[in-house]
Image (cartoon, rainbow, N blue to C red):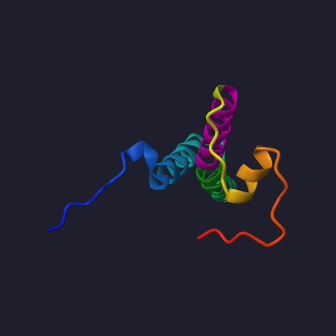
Amino acid sequence: MAEQNLKSGFKSSEFYVTLAQSITGIFVMLGYLTPQEADGLAQAIVEVIGGLMIIVPTAIYLFGRIALKREQVKNGTQETSSPVSSVLDRGEEAPETPVTVK
């Protein structure tokens, strides 16, 4: 059988969905929620967890890139992204013909 790359349990969405369902089940057993309330609450929790699993990694990446760019600007090591921007950074006039970047 081929070796699989599995995530740690707490890094998977299945872990959090199961945890949410278990907690709502405990609340039903203790009488804090009716089964209908538990279904609605579990569904809402699953939707929030799904949203967070999309937003959090994106925010971490975004803030990491911002910090990297700030450091590059601070150190003067920011690389230009195209020939046109390097011309403009040197204070030269931009060429009349478009520059094709491959």
Q: Residue at x 26, y 60 (%)?
A: 4
Q: Which residues are magenta?
A: 56-74
Query: In the rendered image of this protein, does residue 31 appear above or below residue 75?
Result: below
Image coordinates of residue 78 in percent, x first then y, are 64, 39
Image coordinates of residue 42 in percent, x first then y, are 62, 54
Residue 99, quarter of picture: bottom right
Left or right: where 26 falls relative to 93: left
Image coordinates of residue 15 in percent, x first then y, are 45, 50
Query: In the rendered image of this protein, does residue 59 appear above or below residue 4?
Result: above
Query: In the rendered image of this protein, does residue 29 appear above or below residue 95?
Result: above
* Front residue of 82 and 64: 82
Q: Magenta includes 58?
A: yes
Q: Magenta includes 60?
A: yes
* Front residue of 80 and 50: 80
Q: Residue at x 58, y 71 (%)?
A: 102
Image coordinates of residue 45 in percent, x first then y, are 64, 51
Q: Quadrant of the N terminus?
A: bottom left
Q: Residue furthest left?
A: 1
Left or right: where 38 falls relative to 23: right
